[in-house]
Image (cartoon, rainbow, N blue to C red):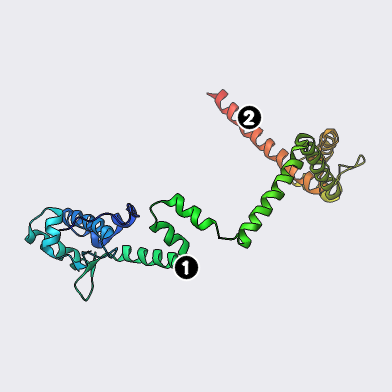
Amino acid sequence: MEKMGFKYSWGKFYWDAWLNDINLQSCDLAAQGLWINLIAIMHKSDQIGYLVINGRPMNVADIAKRVGIRKDRAERLLQKLIDNDVCSVTDEGILYCRRIVREQKKRNQHNSGNEFDLDYKKNDNQFENKKKYSGYRKKNQGEQNVINFSSLYKNIKKEIQNIDILTDMETIKENIKSKNENFYYASGSRLPSDWYPDTQCRRFAFDLNLCPDTMAEDFRDFWHAKHGKEAIKMDWSAAWRRWCRIANQWLKTTSVQSDEKKNLSYF
C-alpha cells in the first residue's frame, strides 16, 4: 500500500462534540479507537473526509492492516460504527465522516473565489510567490482607505501628545460636579428657616404618640446644620413623616429593652 502524506497537517477537533455524541458514546472503546484512527486517515485521503486511497475505497482488509488488527475484528467494529450512525456510507460503498466533508465543502467555497490564495498555497516558496503577485496587483479601495486612515491617525496622535490630559480631566470633573449640584438645587430646596409642622404633620406625630413641638425643634436643628446635597429635599413633609416613624421605632426599641432589664432585675 502506498504511503500517504498529510494534505492538511492539522484539523479541528471538537471535544464536546466527541464526548456528547450519544451514537459514538454508545460504542465500546475499541470502536471509538478505530473511529479516531479513521478520522486521521480521512484527513490524509485523496478525497478529504472519505476513506479513499489511490482513487479507490479502502476495504476492510486495508483498514485492518492500517490500524493493526484482525480483519474479522475490524469488520465487527466497522459494522458497529455504521449501525450507531457514527459514520455514513455512500452508494459506492465509501465510508465518510459527515463533519469533515462539511468543513471541506466550506473550505472549497471560500477558496474558489480567491485565485491568488490558491496559487499561493500551491507554491512551496511562499516568499517568492508573494513577490511575484505583489508586482501587478493594485491597491483596492479598502486598502487605500486604511492608508488614508493611518495618515490621519498619525496627525491626531501628534495633536493628542500636545494636550494636557490631567488639566482637561480636572475641567471635566468640575463641569460634571457643577451640573449635578445645579440639578439637585433645581429639583429641591433646603428647609426654610421659619419652617414649622402644619396641622397634618402635627396630627401624624400625635398618632405615633410623639410630641410635635419637641420633634420639630430637633428636626429644624438637624436639617439647618446639615450641608451639601443631602440637605436638599423635594418634600419636607415626607421627610418629617419619616423622621417621626424613626423616632417612634426608636422609642419602641428602648421600651422593650427597659422591660427586659426590669424582668432580669426581678430574678
* Residue nearest the viewer, comparing 227 with 116: 116
> Outermost residue, right direction?
194
Which residue is rendered at x = 47% and y = 61% of the image? Answer: 116
Question: Would you place residue 205 above or below residue 227 in this image?
Answer: below
Which residue is denoted by mark 2 in the rendering?
A: 258
What residue is shown at x 67% (from left), y 50% (from top)?
150
Left or right of residue 265: residue 127: left
In the image, taking residue 255 as reference, residue 265 lies left or right, namely left
- Amino acid type indicated by mark 2: Ser
Amino acid carrying mark 1 in the image = Gly
Q: Residue 52: image x %, image y %?
A: 22, 65
From the viewer's side, name the closer residue of 173 and 81. Answer: 81
How much space separates mark 1 and mark 2, taking CA atoms? 89 Å
Q: Report the front residue among 140 and 257.
A: 140
Q: Which residue carries the number 1 mark?
A: 113
Residue 260 coordinates in the image, percent (x, y): 58, 30
Q: Nearer the viewer, residue 79 or 163?
A: 163
